[in-house]
Image: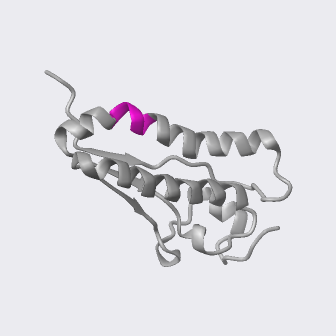
Amino acid sequence: MPLMIFRFVNNAGIAGDQHAAISDQRAVRQCHGRTRGGTCVLTQLVAPCLIKTKGCVVNISSCSTSTIIPGFGVCVMSKAALDTYTRYLAHEMVSHGVRVNAVKLHTHSIIVSPVLERRFGQDGECRD
């Protein structure tokens, strides 16, 4: 039986202490490699299946691409690149009947993960 994929959700990314001006280049490459590179490679692998099934792609983005969260510059830059990739992918895949969208959780929907709690604390104050 051939592989059938109807929906593909990309939720790649790394969050952490990654300031735009002073981050180590290795950390920058790691973040961008996972968010952009991983998403691109995996999408290319499943694209033929999605074209056959007229499926859909959902990329998980971030509300931080339209606001400022201190210390997350590198991560946010990679998510902004993901937004652009999503628009281009949607343009390319529409003729094949494949829908492509991005979902951005807004600030009132943010789940306080251990990474965010370490960075901002439970009171929301930045820990710079």
Q: Main secondary structure of the magenta part?
A: helix
* Depth order, front residue of 113/100: 100
Residue 17 picture location, percent across and down: 75, 56
How many numbered badges does the structure rendering display? 0
Give the quarter of the figure containing the N terminus: top left
Residue 26 seen from this side: yes
Left or right relative to 51: residue 128: right
* Residue 123 found in image quarter: bottom right
Q: How far across and how far down the image is residue 12, in percent? A: 51, 46
| Closest to the observer, 21 or 124 | 21
Question: Is 113 one of the magenta-colored residues?
Answer: no
Q: Residue at x 28, y 33 (%)?
A: 48
Extreme residue in the top direction: 1
Horizontal side of 53 relative to 64 (left or right) equals left
Q: Residue furthest right?
A: 22
Q: Position of residue 15 (x, y in %)?
A: 64, 54
Image: magenta residue range: 42-46
Q: Is residue 2 above or below residue 62?
A: above
Q: Residue at x 70, y 69 (%)?
A: 120
